[in-house]
Image (tube, helix red, strand yellow):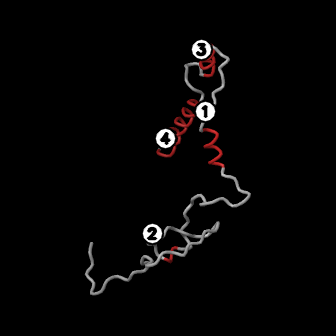
Amino acid sequence: THTVSPRPPPRLCPPAEEAPAIAESPGAAWWPGEWRLPSAFQHALWVVAPPKELEPGLTDITAELRAEQSNGPKVASSQFSESEKRADVHRALGKQGESPAWFGVKVGLISLVIAWIWLTF
């Protein structure tokens, strides 16, 4: 629906005309200058991003992980034959060849049906 009014509605949260002051300190509220957000949102907006440079004493865990994986995954040599692996998989399955996790799913579904019947009738 549209309303006819002689004047426009008040602008409660207009976008800011100037970019925010850059404060590169941990925990400070900051967003890119291209974002024209209302200045009333300064206290409520948090952009989670890595710092541009590390402070002394800090380590970059993601860079360490990337460096470790750059040579490819290290695969342990298999000491079991193919038939031994297949026998171990079948031993881990249930009597009908299903995964033990399906028992939990089955119990949950049966409980759901019982609860629905109890609450409906």
Whole-number angstrom distance, CA of label 2 to CA of label 1: 41 Å
Whole-number angstrom distance, CA of label 4 to CA of label 2: 53 Å
> Is 109 displayed left or right of 59 in the figure?
left
Residue drawn at x 59%, y 38% is 70
Give the mark, 3 or 4, whose residue is nearer the N terminus. Answer: 3
Q: Are marks 2 and 1 in contact (CB under 8 Å)?
A: no
Q: Are marks 3 and 2 in contact (CB under 8 Å)?
A: no
Badge 1: few (under 14), some or many (20 or more) residues near its Cα, within 10 Å?
few
Mark 4 or mark 2, whichever is nearer to me? 2
Badge 4: few (under 14), some or many (20 or more) residues near its Cα, within 10 Å?
few
Q: Looking at the picture, how far across and down is residue 51, in whole percent?
A: 61, 60
Q: Looking at the picture, how far across and down is residue 92, in whole percent?
A: 63, 22
Identify the element where label 1 is drawn.
Answer: loop
Say which quarter of the image contains residue 35. Answer: bottom left
Nearest the camera: 43 or 25? 25
Mark 3 or mark 2, whichever is nearer to me? 2
Q: Amino acid at mark 3?
A: Glu
Q: On the image, numbered disc 2 is attached to which residue?
A: 35
Give the mark, 4 or 1, whose residue is nearer the N terminus. Answer: 1
Q: On the image, numbered disc 3 is attached to which residue?
A: 82
